[in-house]
Image (cartoon, rainbow, N blue to C red):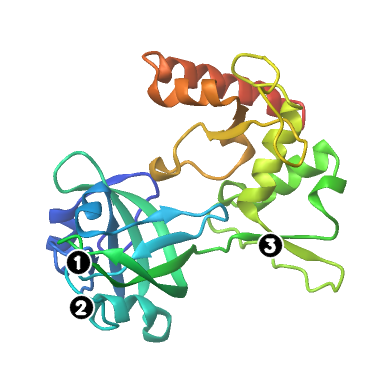
Amino acid sequence: MENGEFEVGKTYSRWFIHDVLKGGRYKGIATPSEHPLIFIFTGDAGSTYGYQDEFLEDDTFLYTGEGTEGEMTMDGGNEAIRSHNANGDDLHLFENTDLPWISTYLGEYEYVGHRRTELPDENGDLRDAFRFELAPIGGTDVELETTPTALSDQELFEKATQSSPAGTQPGEPEETPTNSSTSRSYPRSDIVRKFALRVADGVCQGCEEAAPFRNPSGDPFLEVHHLTRRSDGGPDDPENVIALCPNCHRRVHEGRDGDEFNRRLKDEASVRNKRYR
């Protein structure tokens, strides 16, 4: 950690981070002056100040800028995020846990844009705020020569596996995107999601009942569940997703036997994937 290297899914003490690497330990955006690093922290407590952070379907993370009262301005930590590439600073994202000063490392991200939107400040007054669009290092897109629906189950599994961060071994270079005029980019998470839904074939992988209804496109409605949460280091990878009906999905997250049920689902996913290896 002394060199600004962190392990995705591992928890770290903010006190220790700042003791070693410096930077404001009480700020959501910390900018150590002695290192080319920026630390950004997200968590439920931010909602007190009107902060609204969230992952989008393509794995982009929307991060609310700093400023608890009045309109946000593009300076300080906000400018540090926007200019981190130009300044040669690495941007590291952490999520606060329920334990005081303990945060989970979510990964290295980069600025791709920002939005201006109205959000409440700590007094509940609406104000102009920044929401930064941050993409995980390594990209969020997969290049395909055809559409995902035209791929066989085996081909979809292989593309989903290759596109996942877990599909690249440490020290192994990532596949260079093709420049073919016939190729098209698809969100990495969308390829993995399509695989989980395709192999489920309209049947919940938890209760083995048919999907409860069809969506507006006429497809069976199932939800894709991450067996290990992304905030705990779970990647978008075929090994980490399974398709569930809404009831089973809620059972995992809210049920008394949720943890035990999730372990069974992990076994189901492992058995499923053996067919495609």
Label located before the other in sequence (3 or 2): 2
**CB of mark 1 within 8 Å of CB of mark 3?**
no
The quadrant where residue 225 appears: top right
Q: Residues within 10 Å of mark 1 (few under 14, many from 20)?
A: some
**Quadrant in the picture for the C terminus:** top right
Q: Secondary structure at mark 2?
A: loop
**CB of mark 3 within 8 Å of CB of mark 2?**
no
**Quadrant in the picture for the N terminus:** bottom left
- In the rendered image, the vertical position of residue 201 relative to residue 35, given as above or below: above
Q: Pointer 1: what residue?
A: 21
**Amino acid type at mark 2:** Glu
Label located before the other in sequence (1 or 3): 1
- In the rendered image, the vertical position of residue 5 relative to residue 208, given as above or below: below
Q: Residues within 10 Å of mark 3 (few under 14, many from 20)?
A: few
Q: Residues within 10 Å of mark 2 (few under 14, many from 20)?
A: few
202 relative position to 50: left or right: right
Q: Residue at x 48, y 16 (%)?
A: 261
**Amino acid type at mark 1:** Leu
Which of 218 and 166 lies nearest the eye of the viewer?
Answer: 218
Q: Pointer 2: what residue?
A: 34
Residue 134: mark in rendering:
none
Q: Residue at x 38, y 83 (%)?
A: 83
Residue 175: mark in rendering:
3
Q: Secondary structure at mark 1?
A: helix
253 relative position to 269: left or right: left
**CB of mark 1 within 8 Å of CB of mark 2?**
yes
Residue 79 position in % (x across, y down): 31, 81
Q: Does any portion of residue 3 appear in the rendered image?
A: no
**Amino acid type at mark 3:** Glu
The quadrant where residue 220 appears: top right
Q: Residue at x 61, y 14 (%)?
A: 207
